[in-house]
């Protein structure tokens, strides 16, 4: 800066809208202001006041104002003559030379937002409204964030129908591998242990901003995390702290900051083209007020003072104001993380006790083996054995592949009684005898390479005792039911086709038979009648959660005949063929995944859980506003520094107003403050109102 007679030449750099720096020469007016200093007066000296701001313009005056609650500085410029608004960001530099040295304050960068012209007795004057538009200028470049949280990004990716099908297939492959592990290890693999530090996520988002960022304090949530697992405690157990997640999708970086750090009072402000982020600054010590404004105490003149306290000791000024801001809530209640607890499981019932005492209980968890058993029933006297049922179940690879049972018991003899010989060779009459009453065989097959937990086919054959066939010389059981089912699953676990074929005994009818071969019917015999049914069920996805469900049914009755050693069918009624179809949003049941039969997976429903939201205790602020709650679901305890900024609000303090005839710096600390600077050639006036700590002796 070079001062010449009635002229000031300043060489500096103006930042244009294209952010390309240009070196320009600024011109301003210089006047000498002589101030007489009364004897004993403090804070008044003789100054030479100079101002510079707009290239090639004569500056007639300026005004700059700022508040602690505002994100940007604003003001106005008065320029002599009819001029066009500069197409560049400008700085206002005000310098007071004289007395004990030079005092300089610079305000900017500022952008002209409005211009108007007026004719005065001294000539034309142009009024320029200016503001720090750093945030607005970069608004087009503050792009909406892509998802930064890995598991949220995956969820959004898999939400696409095609990707969802891909994931279903991959999950099936993963489950097949998981099924090879012991049950106790399968559950652990299902748990997603990923997490993201809360403060780190905010900082990663702020790194995307297109302008400089300064964080003025330590982040408020050290050690707190977001978790991928939110349906149960993030420790993988049934009880513990429930994790919470967060999504940055379609949010701007400062929106993320305000949503997370802003919950404990953090804000952002633009000063000098830099974004400052942090909590409200602590109250100033009385001795630090002048340095914070860039001057010495001699340059400040105190205009007024009012006292504020937390209420226990009320200080009043001449106006009668009593402490506590109505903008600050009197109490703040932090709402913290949610803890899941559980009640004991139900005591075992009769069936569970019986199962626990069963020496064969091992069969439920064994992969390969055969389990056999026998059940007996007695008549009312408790002594006569009525029947015995023997059963057998075989497992292979953890799947049941074969079941069979056979029941034998007392049946009436043909004709009502029969003569038999006892051990002594004597004849005796009997009315019932021991015979086979029924048999049942079932087989299961599992053939799908991915969905190995679901059947691809099964067959059940039932043999039933028929009294009219019992002549005492063989087991009068015949095949009364034969059902076979096949299942076709797609790679995504949904059924495509289920086909069932069944042959069931339905009764008998009297048929004339020529036993002598003379062409005449000699006797009537009971002929067996069967019902044959075929059913085919298909499912077709239509999209949008809808399915086409189709069922085709074929039914007929027939009498089996035999010729040349082979069975042929003689249909006795007209076949029936039915087809029904519907569109439904109730889709089919998906295939069973590997490991779904793991007993440990079945323990969870037997426990009764409940959730309780933690509270961090009410925080007294010293304010007079309504009580508020602060939602901090990612914190188990209130972080030590989360509400540190409220400490100053609870102190007994004073609010002071200062004026100065020199340019002051815009303060950053002091709690709630207001600032205004006005200048014209040869003179400057600044006012600032801010809060200070009350001296201990007060």
Image: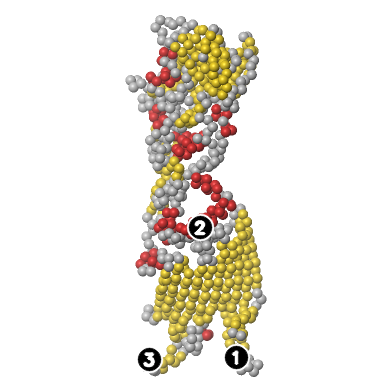
Q: Residue furthest left?
A: 697
> Pointers 2 and 3 in contact (CB under 8 A)?
no
Between the C-alphas of marks 2 and 3, the distance is 66 Å
> Pointers 2 and 1 in contact (CB under 8 A)?
no
Question: Where 285 falls versus 390 (above or below)?
Answer: above
Number of callouts: 3
Viewer-closest of 20 and 309: 20
Q: Residue at x 57, y 58 (%)?
A: 587
Q: Would residue 543 be seen by someone viewing this image from the given angle?
A: yes
Viewer-closest of 537 and 202: 202
Left or right of 542: which side holds 102?
A: left
Left or right of 622: which side holds 1?
A: right
Q: Which quadrant of the structure image shows residue 183?
A: bottom left
Rendered location of residue 407, percent (x, y): 45, 78
Residue density around tag 3, few if under 14, some if 14–19, many if 20 or more, within 10 Å: few
Between the C-alphas of marks 3 and 1, the distance is 39 Å
Q: Residue furthest front?
A: 23
First reached walking from the N terminus: tag 2 or tag 1: 2
Q: Residue at x 40, y 23 (%)?
A: 284
Residue density around tag 2, few if under 14, some if 14–19, many if 20 or more, within 10 Å: some
Left or right of 42: which side holds 156?
A: right
Question: Where 32 falls versus 497 (above or below)?
Answer: above
Residue, disc 1: 523
Rendered location of residue 223, percent (x, y): 40, 40
Q: Which label lies toward us, 2 or 3?
A: 2
Q: Which label lies toward us, 2 or 1?
A: 2
Which label is found at residue 423?
3
Question: Where 373 falls versus 230 (above or below)?
Answer: below
First reached walking from the N terminus: tag 3 or tag 1: 3
Q: Would residue 331 be seen by someone viewing this image from the given angle?
A: no
Q: Residue at x 53, y 9 (%)?
A: 4
Residue, disc 2: 173
């Amino acid at each position: 800066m070079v001062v010449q007679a009635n002229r000031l030449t300043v060489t500096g750099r103006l930042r244009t809208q294209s952010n390309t720096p240009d070196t320009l020469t600024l011109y301003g007016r210089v006047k000498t202001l002589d101030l007489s200093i009364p004897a004993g007066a403090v804070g008044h000296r003789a100054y030479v006041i100079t101002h510079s701001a707009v290239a090639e313009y004569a500056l007639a005056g300026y005004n700059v104002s700022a508040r602690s609650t505002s994100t940007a500085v604003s003001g106005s410029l008065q320029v002599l003559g009819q001029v066009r608004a500069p197409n560049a960001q400008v700085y206002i530099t005000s310098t007071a030379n004289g007395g004990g040295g030079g005092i300089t304050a610079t305000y900017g960068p500022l952008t002209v937002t409005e211009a108007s012209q007026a004719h005065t007795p001294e000539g034309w004057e142009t009024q320029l409204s200016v503001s720090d538009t750093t945030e607005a200028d970069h608004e087009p470049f503050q792009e909406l964030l892509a998802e930064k949280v890995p598991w949220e990004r995956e969820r959004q990716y898999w939400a696409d129908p095609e990707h969802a099908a891909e994931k279903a297939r991959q999950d099936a492959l993963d489950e097949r591998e998981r099924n090879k592990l012991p049950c106790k290890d399968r559950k652990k693999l299902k748990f997603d242990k990923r997490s993201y530090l809360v403060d780190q996520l905010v900082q990663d988002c702020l790194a995307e901003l297109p302008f400089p960022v300064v964080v003025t304090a330590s982040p408020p949530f050290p050690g707190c995390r977001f978790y991928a697992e939110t349906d149960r405690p993030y420790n993988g157990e049934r009880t513990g702290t429930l994790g919470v997640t967060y999504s940055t999708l379609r949010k701007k970086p400062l929106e993320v900051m305000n949503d997370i750090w802003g919950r404990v009072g953090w804000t952002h402000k633009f000063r000098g083209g830099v974004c400052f982020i942090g909590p409200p600054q602590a109250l100033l010590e009385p001795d630090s007020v002048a340095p914070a404004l860039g001057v010495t105490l001699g340059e400040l003149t105190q205009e007024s003072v009012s006292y504020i306290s937390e209420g226990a000791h009320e200080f009043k000024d001449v106006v009668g104001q009593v402490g506590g801001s109505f903008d600050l809530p009197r109490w703040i209640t932090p709402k913290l993380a949610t803890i899941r607890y559980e009640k004991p499981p139900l005591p075992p019932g009769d069936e569970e006790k019986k199962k626990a005492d069963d020496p064969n209980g091992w069969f439920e968890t064994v992969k390969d083996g055969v389990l056999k058993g026998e059940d007996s029933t007695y008549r009312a006297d408790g002594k006569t054995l009525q029947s015995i049922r023997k059963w057998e179940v075989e497992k292979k690879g953890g799947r049941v592949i074969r079941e069979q049972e056979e029941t034998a018991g007392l049946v009436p003899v043909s004709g009502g009684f029969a003569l038999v010989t006892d051990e002594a060779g004597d004849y005796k009459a009997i009315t019932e005898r021991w015979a086979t009453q029924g048999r049942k065989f079932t087989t299961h097959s599992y053939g799908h390479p991915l969905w190995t937990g679901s059947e691809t086919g099964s067959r059940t054959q039932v043999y039933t005792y028929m009294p009219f066939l019992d002549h005492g010389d063989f087991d009068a059981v015949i095949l009364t039911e034969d059902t076979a089912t096949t299942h076709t699953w797609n790679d995504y676990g949904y059924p495509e086709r289920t086909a069932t074929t069944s042959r069931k005994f339905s009764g008998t009818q009297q048929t004339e038979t020529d036993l002598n071969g003379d062409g005449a019917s000699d006797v009537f015999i009971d002929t067996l009648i069967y019902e044959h049914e075929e059913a085919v069920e298909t499912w077709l996805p239509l999209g949008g959660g809808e399915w086409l469900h189709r069922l085709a049914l074929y039914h007929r009755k027939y009498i089996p005949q035999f010729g040349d050693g082979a069975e042929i069918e003689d249909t006795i009624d007209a076949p029936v063929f039915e087809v029904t179809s519907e569109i439904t949003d109730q889709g089919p049941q998906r295939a069973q995944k590997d490991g779904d039969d793991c007993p440990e997976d079945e323990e969870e429903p037997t426990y009764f859980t409940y959730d309780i939201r933690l509270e961090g205790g009410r925080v007294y602020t010293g304010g007079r506003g309504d009580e508020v709650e602060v939602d901090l679901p990612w914190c188990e305890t209130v972080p030590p520094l989360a509400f540190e900024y409220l400490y100053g609000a609870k102190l007994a303090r004073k609010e002071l107003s200062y004026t100065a005839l020199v340019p002051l710096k815009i303060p950053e600390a002091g709690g709630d403050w207001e600032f205004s600077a006005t200048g014209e050639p040869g003179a400057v006036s600044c006012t600032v109102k801010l809060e200070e700590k009350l001296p201990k002796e007060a």
